[in-house]
């Protein structure tokens, strides 16, 4: 899941911030922010917005390469995050590639290319594998195969059974029966 990707100790080489030396503009800018704090709240939001734009223009003028590369890197990371989020939230929703690409604000070809880069397999391979993992887990919890097929996004049970058999070599019903037998045997021992 996306949450599992948040590192407990961030990699310092990938930390998303830039450090700038404190020049005269920055010193004056900080002083002006301190003065703004004491002003009334009626225009404060607008003033802060303008002050932020002022700072960004200064930094862009003084450090164009750093600012633009930082922006590009963050846009790429955000695009990757959007793809992962769309995929994980729609594992069992049977969205088309066009619909997933639309959710990620990309073309279908860009979506496919980025998907393969992120997951090292095609969308159809990934979705099949993930659905079958979910199905396997549900069958191990003794759920009915026809209910499982619906839960993992199949419209008919025979398509689900065929896919399950393709991945695991046995039908969902046989898989469930085998695991029930193993569970019973463990209880009897």
Image: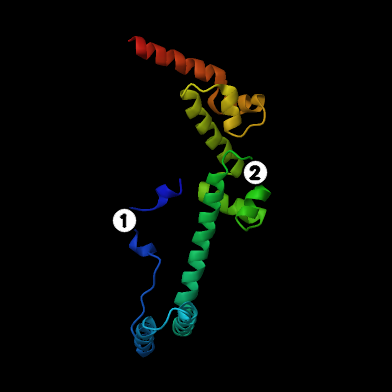
Q: Is residue 67 above or below residue 78?
A: below
Residue 164 visible in image: no
Categorize mark 1 by other alpha carbons within 10 Å: few (<14), some (14-19), many (20+): few
Q: Nearer the viewer, residue 53 or 32?
A: 32
Q: Dot 1 lies on which element?
A: loop
Question: Disc 2 or 1, which lies upstream in sequence?
Answer: 1
Few, some or many residues within 10 Å of mark 2 (<14, 14–19, 20+): few
The N terminus: image quadrant = top left
Can you give x and y, in whole percent of width and height, for residue 187 in the image? Answer: 36, 13
In the current view of this chain or complex, which residue is farthest to the top? 188
Q: Tell whether 131 sits left or right of 35.
A: right
Query: Which sits in the foreground, 43 or 96?
Result: 43
Task: Name the residue rendered at 46%, 24% in the picture.
Answer: 141
Residue at numbered disc 2:
95
Where the C terminus falls, by quadrant? Answer: top left
Front label number (2 vs 1): 2
Instruction: State the image quarter where residue 102 is shown.
Output: bottom right
Is 50 placed above or below 18 here?
below
Q: Quadrant of residue 188?
A: top left
The picture places residue 122, in percent across and down from the top left corner, at 59, 44
Residue 118 in percent (x, y) is at: 51, 50
Total marks placed: 2
- In the drawing, what numbered circle is on residue 50? none
Tell me the residue at 38%/83% (across/down).
Answer: 33
- Where is residue 14? Give x, y as percent: 39, 63
The answer to the question of whether label 2 and label 1 lie on touching residues, with beta carbons closer than 8 A, is: no
Q: Secondary structure at mark 2?
A: loop
Q: CA distance from mark 2 to mark 1?
A: 35 Å
Q: Report the residue at 66% width, 27% height from top.
A: 159
User: Residue 9: which numbered mark, if any?
Assistant: 1
């Amino acid at each position: 899941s996306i949450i599992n990707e948040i590192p407990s100790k961030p990699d310092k080489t990938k930390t998303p911030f830039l450090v700038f030396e404190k020049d005269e503009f920055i010193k004056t800018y900080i002083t002006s922010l301190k003065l703004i704090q004491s002003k009334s709240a009626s225009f404060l939001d607008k003033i802060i917005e303008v002050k932020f734009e002022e700072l960004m223009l200064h930094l862009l003028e003084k450090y164009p390469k750093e600012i633009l590369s930082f922006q590009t890197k963050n846009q790429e990371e955000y695009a990757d995050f959007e793809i992962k989020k769309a995929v994980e939230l729609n594992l069992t929703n049977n969205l088309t590639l066009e619909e997933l690409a639309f959710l990620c604000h990309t073309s279908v070809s860009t979506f496919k290319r980025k998907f393969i880069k992120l997951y090292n397999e095609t969308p159809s391979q990934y979705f099949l594998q993930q659905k079958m993992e979910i199905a396997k887990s549900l069958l191990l919890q003794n759920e009915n195969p026809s209910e499982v097929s619906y839960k993992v996004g199949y419209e008919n049970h025979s398509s689900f059974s065929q896919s399950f058999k393709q991945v695991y070599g046995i039908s969902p019903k046989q898989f469930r029966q085998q695991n029930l037998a193993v569970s019973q045997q463990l209880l009897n021992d």
